[in-house]
Image (cartoon, rainbow, N blue to C red):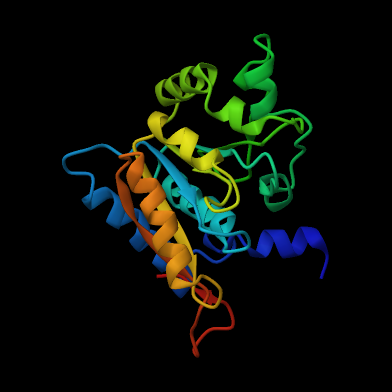
Amino acid sequence: MSKQKTAKRKLITAVNPSSPISEQFKTLRAGIHFSSVDKEYKSILVTSPEPESGKSTVSANLAICYAKQGNKTLLIDADMRKPTSHRTFGIPYNVGLSDMLTDSKTELKDVCHQTEIENLMVLTSGTMVPNPNELLGSKKMEQLLKQFAEQFDQIIIDTPPILASSDALVLTPYVEGAIVVLCSDKTLKERAKTAVQQLQKTHIPIIGTVLNRVKNNSSNYYYYQ
């Protein structure tokens, strides 16, 4: 199977919207909605304790669910160390978020990509930089997110794993909530606990967790809960 087909297969909510997995993502979206009675979760940070837990796949499918509901949605690939959104959606990533943060002349319309999914746009990580942590924690990043909030109904931000770098943590002052993705066959309890504790220290509301890759005998794919 080609890399492009493999990447597309991850977008289960787009290629098979009536599947049990897609229904789980819709449940996740609904859960976020009902938990936001007292606080609006317009910008949501998605992270995980360690790499390869499926956080990027969760971010993409959650963004698709919001878009399919009619929300103008922006998916931001803020993982400048190991970006994946360009492969998942088959779009170029030579310019993106990092370029907006380092070049005041670069505007969203110049680097944002409209996907095949109505209402969903993707901002890739952009040019590789040596200081992603400083850029993500900058005032410029805060300004950009405020700007995006005026243009979009929902913002999903895919960030690096917490135990691999502090990139996700420096973004917490600028977003409304966080989702932690745990891998059932990989994430150790202590790692999950440490990741949550680090997020709690920033006082960001943790909306919930996604238990990923739970084997379901009735499906050949992963089960999201």
Nearest to the observer: residue 26 or residue 140: 140
Query: Measured along the vertical axis of the image, is residue 187 above or below residue 57?
Result: below
Query: Measured along the vertical axis of the image, is residue 180 above or below residue 218?
Result: above
Q: Residue at x 38, y 60 (%)?
A: 209
Q: Residue at x 43, y 71 (%)?
A: 189
Displayed quadrant of residue 107:
top right
Residue that sits furthest to the top in the current view:
105
Residue that sits furthest to the left in the current view:
38
174 on left or right of 107? left
Q: In the rendering, at what x and y percent does residue 70 appear?
A: 40, 42
51 on left or right of 128? left
Report the number of discs: 0
Nearest to the observer: residue 189 or residue 99: 189
Nearest to the observer: residue 157 or residue 115: 157
Q: In the rendering, at what x and y percent does residue 223 appear?
A: 48, 75
Q: In the rendering, at what x and y percent does residue 154 appear?
A: 41, 37
The quarter of the rendered structure image containing the N terminus is: bottom right
Residue 34 appears in the picture as rendered: yes
Q: Residue at x 22, y 51 (%)?
A: 34
The quarter of the rendered structure image containing the C terminus is: bottom left
Q: Residue at x 52, y 27 (%)?
A: 137
Residue 18 appears in the picture as rendered: no
Displayed quadrant of residue 43:
top left
Residue that sits furthest to the bottom in the current view:
217
